[in-house]
Amino acid sequence: MPASANPTNRLERLLRPRSIAVIGGGAFGTNVVKQSLKMGFSGDIWPVHPTKDTVEGLPAYRSVADLPSAPDATFIGVNRFLTIEMIKALREKGAGGAICFAAGFLEAGNDDADGARLQAELIEAAGTMPVIGPNCYGLINYADGALLWPDQHGGKRLGAGERGAAIITQSSNIACNLTMQQRGLPIAFLMTAGNQAQTTLAEMALGLIEDERVSCLGLHIEGFRDASGFERLASRARELRKPIVAMKVGRSEQARAATVSHTASLAGSDAASDAFLKRIGIARVDTIPSLLETLKLFHNGGPLSGRRLSSMSCSGGEASVMADSVEGRQVGFPPLAPEHRARIKDTLGPLVAIANPLDYHTFIWNDRPAMSATFGAMASGRFDLNLLVLDFPRADRCSDADWWTAVDAFEAGLKAHGARGAIVTTMLENLSENHAEALFQRGITPLHGVAEAFDAAEAAAFVGNTWARAEALPVRGAVLSEAALGGEQRAAPPQTLSEAVAKAKLSAFGIAVPSGVQVDTAEAAVGAARELGFPVVLKALGIAHKSEMQAVRLNLRDEEEVRQAAAQLESLGSGLYVERMITGGIAELIVGITRDPIFGPVMTLGTGGVLVELLQDSVTLLLPSSRDDIEQALRRLKLFPLLDGYRGRPKADLPATLDAIEAIAAFALAHGDEVEELDINPLIVCAEGQGAWAADALLVMQQKAGA
């Protein structure tokens, strides 16, 4: 058991077993025995079979009751009905935990009437004994050679004192594929989560990162079960300085069957998931190769402290590829300072243009002292990561001896300045697994693919930046998830409030709304306009998207214009609403709230107005969010330069804008999970000192039982 093993961890015996029981005599059960023997597991392996005397040369036991003692970990490879019996027997024996291979439980959905019932029976049979799955392949512990795994795999056991990444995936087939990687990534543990009937992916991850042989964690996530578990995981990973990267897939439908707000079209469940991962400091990538490359960068040095990169290659073409590929990313190649340029220039002579990315040409190729001087001069610039583009020739037809001269020089240049470096190959096949492992031994990260290398650098810089800030508050969903998932009795379907009622509720929370009056007739509208003062806005109430239905008239300047507009709008809705016209607007924002069943209130900020969906300029935040979080989100909008006085225009009233958004967030939090949807579109932002005004408001609220 490793020094960092935690006896109080519920999964400790299962993850790092000293004894393994294997139930099931078919090919899957036999493979589990075979794989653990092949990997050199030093503990006990106890096959369980009602008729066989041996399995792979090991004596078999007729039942769980006949085992010499309670196994630490058990692989159950029998049908779903018998699985429940085995779980109960193992729990009564005092086993440490079990992998449930069988499918046909809750993941079967409506296609199998028995699925939900069997899952409930499985959970009851297990009690407090940890169960992984069902419907999963299980666990590969490369650190101890313990494989509760029913198939072949491509990994190898860690050596004494070695560390590696831990990976958890919700797909067993993806897990198999990951073991076949030839990118040089050392893997300490690989797990599949199955349908997480009892043990969640977050709990598995918490169990794995405690092991001192785990350097970092990779997650393949199809969906979140809860927020609080991942918050605990991210916090503990931060304490242990073990970064996490996730590939979150499944851009699933929004929680409600139908939505009426613009916000809901922007803030689906994937936007909420992305905001949640950002909030807790888990980097997100979109592909399996980028997941692996990020884990390699994490494994070999952890997160990056910043976003400044350097690049060197002996080709102008490669330098151009690097420069073009980083365009629009959160990492980049800063220009070289004059004194830094001079240091590099001194090592290369007059014929080489000094820049970042650097094409150092082939004048110094295979000249180790000269290359070391150049690489060291570049690395002296205190970049967060130094990249050397180097595609190795194919070994079956060519010699790569000269390429190792470049590696030697790069290693020397990095060490001379205490710098961090990676070798990037533009094509996967141009850096073999053996070469990648050799680079790791030298402290250089091997990165396969230019795009993947930048994905990894962005992820590493993101985690480093997040760890440099204070931890975020728990999301409201961590408190409300049970009710939001349907545990609370609802009295009635959601109700869309009139704009007048919605604005009255918002105004009570300090949100600035224009003065307005609800009326029933054209003449009453004229009288209201006279009292409010011209210009005014006239709207038909009871219509969600007024602009699309031509149910709003702006900038009405006298009584006759109001009278004519009222005559046109009277028949459209459920009444009329006269409102003071806000003038002097700098920009229009949308500020919206939706309620996610896992994360609770989700706030969307973006460019507002009638083209909100077309422009798709928005950011998503979970609540509660600090004022600084809100300001940083605004600054990420393409619209923000308008708020900041673009090309000499007046600056917007940013403090009032932040006040308004904070008040909207406070309203959503105060009303818990009653708020289904809230759209303030537009929030008209005026010049400095003139405020920010909720010019239109759509509020859909859930009525509680007894209300």
Image (cartoon, rainbow, N blue to C red):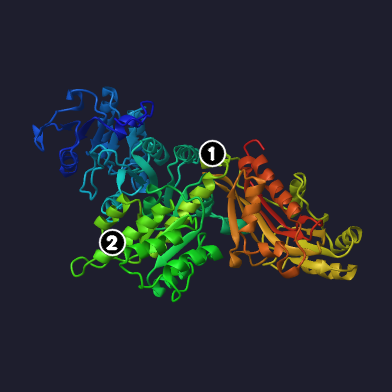
* Image x and y of residue 362, in percent: 35, 73
* Image x and y of residue 440, in percent: 32, 51
Report which residue position mark 1 lands on.
478
* Image x and y of residue 705, in percent: 62, 37
Say which of 11 and 572 sits in front: 11
Q: Helix, strand, or loop for circle 2?
A: helix
Q: Helix, strand, or loop for circle 1?
A: helix
Q: Which mark is residue 127?
A: none
Residue 116, visible in the rendered structure: yes
> Is residue 116 placed above or below 4 in the rendered structure?
below
Q: Is residue 33 left or right of residue 392?
A: left
Marks 2 and 1, the one that precedes in the sequence: 2
Q: Amino acid at mark 1?
A: Ala
Say which of 648 and 582 sits in front: 648
Give the Cα distance between marks 2 and 1: 52 Å
**Residue drawn where x is 45% and y is 56% of the image:** 385
Q: Residue 673 occupies which quadrant of the picture?
A: top right
